[in-house]
Amino acid sequence: QVQLQESGPGLVKPSQTLSLTCTVSGVSIRTHYYYWSWIRRPPGKGLEWMGSINYSGATYYSPSLKSRTSISRDTSKNQITLQLSSVTPEDTAVYYCARVDGGYYRDFDKYDYWGQGTQVTVSS
């Protein structure tokens, strides 16, 4: 049974770096050919794909967030980590990690597993 669980601080101050962890159970994050993504939904807005890391560790980022985003993995812990630097109140959102089979990471309908999401508020 595949499960994804996001964890991290719910409140971050402007200019700081947000760090979230997605703990995956039931499947290895190195299994071919899965891609693991961070997706967020700001209040009143739609889903926004942030970036992905695949089974080999290759990363892919949204052009609008690439300069501030880093996705990494810890294979020994079966975890995916998101770091978003220089946060502003516009980064307030519910953050999800999710899995897609193959490289269809820009298509939300292709994702078969999602975490429950974690609320992150950027405020001083």
Image (cartoon, helix red, strand yellow):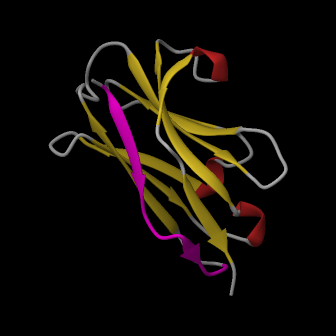
Asked if residue 24 lies left or right of residue 76, the reply is right
Task: Looking at this view, name the residue that lies furthest to the left.
Answer: 76
Measured along the vertical axis of the image, is residue 117 above or below residue 75?
below
Count of residue discs: 0
Task: Looking at this view, name the residue that lies furthest to the bottom.
Answer: 124
The residue stretch that appears in magenta = 2-14
Asked if residue 31 lies left or right of residue 12, the reply is left
| Residue 9 falls inside the magenta stretch | yes
Residue 97 position, x and y percent, is: 49, 40
Residue 22 position, x and y percent, is: 38, 47
Q: Can the viewer see residue 107?
A: no
Front position in the image: 64 or 4: 4
Measured along the vertical axis of the image, is residue 86 above or below residue 47?
below
- Residue drawn at 67 percent across, 73 percent down: 122
Residue 71 position, x and y percent, is: 45, 46
Front position in the image: 97 or 1: 1
Measured along the vertical axis of the image, is residue 48 above or below residue 111?
below
- Residue drawn at 57 percent across, 52 percent down: 69
| Residue 111 falls inside the magenta stretch | no
Look at the image and tell me in which quarter the N terminus lies: top left
